[in-house]
């Protein structure tokens, strides 16, 4: 799962990022509302959830949220605010936020709300994915090959899940990179190829399960 934190308090944003990464999420930070708005409008499938501050430079969170919903962005949004009146909450929810959390808050509560939002059905996405001899439980992060469990790192799991959810489609290296890594890392490295290589070893793949599309990326084909 990949989360975008839109928060102009640098210390809070970094603390949220570190805490969420420890829970297994990939996290990006944007500190400007207008920048965040444009990024999501361009890359509407990049994130699984957005943590959005209400008061932001560039464009306020309520306006950003409203813009996304008007453009049919359906990503779950958890809005944060230092304004804790009922009217403020109503404005945020009416703009399209899925939940609302007042500052200051405990990280445990934030995490619980994020997990609750991510449990909501998203276009009937299946929990159990299968492909040939591979099966993964996306909720429990359990992977089996020929009914025997195999151990994957978090990034390997994210890459495998993304390929399986998009089977029969050619997935570029940039697609995989955007899904599993934050944009602070260097996309010019061979990170994706290394993880694919390690993943193939663990699922006993000689290149027939995860096919290499030369010059483009990878594909899992039925």
Image (cartoon, helix red, strand yellow):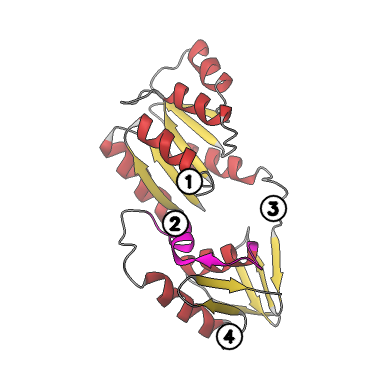
Residue 188 is situated, as x and y percent measured from the top left of the image, at 31, 66
Is 44 placed above or below 95 here? below
Label 3 element class? loop
Left or right: where 99 falls relative to 128: left
Q: Is residue 2 left or right of residue 70?
A: left
The reply to whether callout 3 and callout 4 are in contact (CB within 8 Å) is: no
**Crowd band around label 2 with a 10 angstrom C-alpha radius: few (<14), some (14–19), many (20+):** some
Magenta residue span: 165-182
Q: Which mark is residue 125?
A: 3
Label 4 Cα neighbours within 10 Å, binned few <14 / some 14-19 / many ≥20: few
Report the Cα–Cα distance between label 3 and label 1: 20 Å
Q: Position of residue 94 (x, y in %)?
A: 58, 19
Q: Which residue is mark 4?
A: 205
Q: Is residue 106 visible?
A: no
- Mark 1 and mark 2 in contact? Answer it, CB < 8 Å: yes
Q: Is residue 201 left or right of residue 134?
A: left
* Distance of label 1 from label 2 (alpha carbons): 10 Å
Q: Earlier in the sequence, mark 3 or mark 1?
A: 1
Report x, y in % for residue 205: 58, 85
Label 1: which residue?
Answer: 43
The Cα atoms of the two marked residues, 3 and 4, are separated by: 26 Å
Quadrant for residue 32, please give it.
top left
Relative depth, front residue between 43 and 92? 43
In the rendered image, which quarter contains the C terminus? bottom right
**Which residue carries the number 2 mark?**
178
Whether residue 211 appears in magenta in the rendering, the answer is no
Find the distance from the CA under tag 3 to the CA under tag 2.
20 Å
* Dot 3 or dot 2, earlier in sequence: 3
Say if 135 sits above or below 104 in the image: below
Residue drawn at 52 percent across, 16 percent down: 91
Q: Gap in Å between the C-alphas at discs 2 and 4?
A: 24 Å
Question: Is residue 106 left or right of 143 when viewed as pictured?
Answer: left
């Amino acid at each position: 799962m990949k989360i975008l934190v839109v928060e102009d308090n640098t210390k809070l944003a970094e603390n949220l990022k570190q805490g969420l990464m420890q829970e297994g999420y990939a996290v990006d930070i944007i500190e400007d509302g207008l920048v965040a708005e444009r990024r999501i409008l361009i890359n509407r499938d990049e994130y699984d959830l957005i943590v959005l501050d209400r008061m932001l430079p560039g464009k306020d969170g309520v306006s950003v949220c409203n813009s996304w919903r008007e453009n049919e962005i359906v990503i779950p949004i958890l809005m944060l605010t230092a304004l804790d009146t009922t009217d403020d909450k109503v404005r945020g929810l009416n703009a399209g936020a899925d939940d609302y959390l007042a500052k200051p808050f405990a990280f445990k509560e934030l995490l619980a709300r994020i997990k609750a939002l991510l449990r909501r059905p998203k276009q009937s996405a299946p929990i159990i994915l299968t492909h040939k001899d591979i099966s993964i439980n996306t909720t429990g992060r359990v992977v089996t090959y020929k009914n025997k469990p195999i151990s994957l790192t978090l990034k390997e799991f994210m890459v495998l899940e993304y390929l399986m959810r998009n089977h029969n489609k050619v997935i570029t290296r940039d697609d995989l990179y955007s899904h599993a890594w934050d944009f602070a890392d260097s996309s010019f490295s061979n990170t994706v190829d290394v993880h694919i290589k390690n993943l193939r070893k663990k699922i006993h793949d000689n290149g027939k399960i995860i096919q290499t599309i030369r010059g483009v990326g990878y594909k899992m084909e039925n």
